[in-house]
């Protein structure tokens, strides 16, 4: 697996998608989904200039992060149980998968004890899939300002996982819906929310065309993970 070549190809595709959408490529960040990958793979990507990495399990991240280059910076992208909030606060610069008021409360308590401000994204189940975690659009709007009131949490935007399809175009309405929800949240907040985390290996170009500022790519960068290492409840790459 030539990670450097894969990374260059993904960056080229990001630039091309931005060009089609009349966007500046600097507006879109790449998050390398490193869950299920060894520290050596992270080091290879970091040596080629990749900065941001995403993990889905606190336990895996806790073991892996100390083995990785100090330049690597980390996001939590998988479902986060409330009893792992304290560890998540210490391990990650951003938690993308805040999907309930209860989880936000526990993150606030953990961040307060750590005297730390935590950047978060609110995860939205924009397609209404019964197998996916995330806020419903209605509940998101209902609870948004309550979460925003937590002094140790900074809401930077929204995240979603589109349903898998062999056709990226089928994800477009989901990405468009998330962009519209962000606008509604910005109206509530009276301030901009800079981050839309949407798009993965199979659909990130479509997501960029619909306004994504952060794409999460794993398989196209690192190759397929072993089925024994996959978590069906966690976010795919």
Image (tube, grey):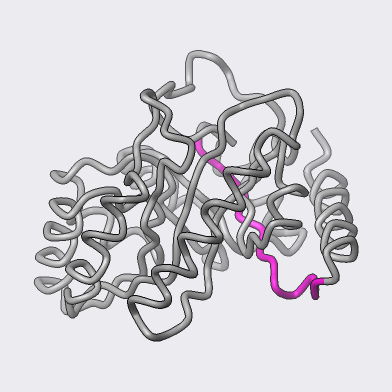
Residue lying at the far top of the rendered structure: 228
Residue at the spot 69% in from the left edge and 33% down from the top edge: 170
Q: Nearer the viewer, residue 75 or 99?
A: 99
Q: Is residue 28 magenta?
A: yes
Q: Position of residue 130 (x, y in %)?
A: 36, 24
Q: Quadrant of residue 58 in the image?
A: top left
Q: Nearer the viewer, residue 103 or 221?
A: 103
- Which stretch appears magenta? 23-35
Q: Is residue 200 left or right of residue 185?
A: right
Q: Nearer the viewer, residue 138 or 165?
A: 138
Q: Position of residue 16 (x, y in %)?
A: 90, 58
Q: How many marks?
A: 0
Q: Position of residue 149 (x, y in %)?
A: 18, 76
Which quarter of the figure is the C terminus placed in? Answer: top right
Residue at the spot 42% in from the left edge and 28% down from the top edge: 129
Q: Is residue 13 magenta?
A: no
Q: Position of residue 68 (x, y in %)?
A: 52, 53
Which quarter of the figure is the N terminus placed in? Answer: top right
Residue at the spot 60% in from the left edge and 49% down from the top edge: 175
Q: Is residue 227 above or below residue 39?
A: above
Q: Is residue 164 left or right of residue 190?
A: right
């Amino acid at each position: 697996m030539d990670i450097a070549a894969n990374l260059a190809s993904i960056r080229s595709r990001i630039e091309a998608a931005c060009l089609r959408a009349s966007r500046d490529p600097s507006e879109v960040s790449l998050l390398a989904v490193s869950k299920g990958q060894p520290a050596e793979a992270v080091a290879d990507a970091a040596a080629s200039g990749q900065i941001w990495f995403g993990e889905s399990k606190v336990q895996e991240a806790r073991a892996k992060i100390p083995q990785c280059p100090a330049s690597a910076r980390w996001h939590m992208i998988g479902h986060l149980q409330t009893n792992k909030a304290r560890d998540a606060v210490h391990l990650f610069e951003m938690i993308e998968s805040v999907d309930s008021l209860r989880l936000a409360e526990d993150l606030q308590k953990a961040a307060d004890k750590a005297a730390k401000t935590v950047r978060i994204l609110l995860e939205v189940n924009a397609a209404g899939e019964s197998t996916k975690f995330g806020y419903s659009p209605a509940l998101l709007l209902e609870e948004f300002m309550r979460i925003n009131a937590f002094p140790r949490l900074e809401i930077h935007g929204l995240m979603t996982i589109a349903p898998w399809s062999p056709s990226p175009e089928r994800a477009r309405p989901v990405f468009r819906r998330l962009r519209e929800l962000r606008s509604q949240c910005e109206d509530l907040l009276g301030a901009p929310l800079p981050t839309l985390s949407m798009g993965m290996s199979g659909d990130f170009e479509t997501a960029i065309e619909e306004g994504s500022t952060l794409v999460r790519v794993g398989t196209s960068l690192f190759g397929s993970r072993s089925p024994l290492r996959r978590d069906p409840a966690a976010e795919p790459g």
